[in-house]
Amino acid sequence: MTLLTLQARALLLPEEAVPRPATPAGPQGAALSVPDLARDLAASGTRRLQDATTTDDGGLARLLAGIGAAQLLAAERLQAGTVAATPPVRSVPASTTATPCPSPKAAPAASAPTEPATAPSPDAAAALSAVVQAEREAVYAYEAAMPRLAPGAAGPASAFLGSHRTLVRDAENRLLLHCRATPIQQPGYAIDADFLQSPAGRLGRLEAGTLGAYGDLIALSEGGIREWAVSSLRAAAARAVQWGADPGPLPGLAIDPAQLPELPGPSEPAGQPGPATQGPQR
């Protein structure tokens, strides 16, 4: 209830808000069973992720992706009391994603495959470069954590390390195939004492930290790149939860619930103030 209420507030347009706290609605019809609620949450989350890949509004795409990811995580908790297996990374083969960059000494081949999506804008390319950096740091952290993890955590960590290596390759390939330079490879990243003492907790925070980079990419891209970013954000949120981190109610989007508009009360239409709040609306 808390998750869905906050998400509804995030989707509310300013002119639909009311300048007073919302009153919880009474029971409406038969109560859903836990399995039914999990099923409906999963269906809703899947639709929101699909909507995020097709909307023309980048900001709305980012919001919908966060809503969908959080709803799917909530559905998995209800279904099994824990988070289900992390969804696989959707790898994008380099040979089918875009026309290779033209060579100054040779004309491009007429039969070269082309990507149906538009090449990234400068802002989207910058966001994709940020994803490359975030994923390279994740690979470095997992490699450093592997010998320090408990035996039971080594298996999932090895699988996650493979996912991050795939994500680095996919992001770099997308930049190169659209004739964008990849970021310079850093020789290493700082590892603090907290990481050495509790690598699992640090990996959770690192996974949660990648969500903002994917959220930026979703908002600034379109087509195949956005679809890949939405899938990657969903998987990153699941990995964060498996390490005990909280990706928040809208993964990939930092919000302050206190700044969100309130929902209308149960008996008043959206945009109409209650009896005790007549006057200008927000």
Image (cartoon, grey):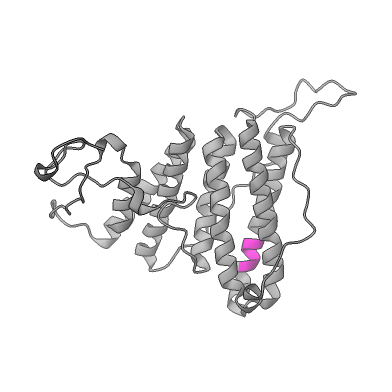
The residue sitting at the right extreme is 105
Q: Position of residue 231 (x, y in %)?
A: 53, 47
Q: Position of residue 210 (x, y in %)?
A: 58, 54
Task: Tell me how many marks there are.
Answer: 0
Magenta part of the protein: which range?
Answer: 157-161
Q: Nearer the viewer, residue 2 or 225?
A: 2
Q: Position of residue 90 (x, y in %)?
A: 59, 47
Q: For residue 32, what is the image quadrant? A: bottom left
Can you say which quadrant of the picture contains the N terminus? Answer: bottom left
Q: For residue 128, what is the image quadrant? A: top right
- Prevailing SS of the magenta stretch: helix
* Residue drawn where x is 78% and y is 29% of the image: 101
* Residue drawn where x is 28% and y is 52% of the image: 5
Q: Position of residue 143 (x, y in %)?
A: 71, 67
Reply above or below: 32 against 128: below
Lateral position of residue 38 relative to residue 107, left or right: left
* Residue drawn where x is 71% and y is 69% of the image: 144
Reply above or below: 122 against 196: above
Q: Is residue 199 magenta?
A: no
* Residue drawn where x is 78% and y is 48% of the image: 184
Q: Nearer the viewer, residue 209 or 95?
A: 209
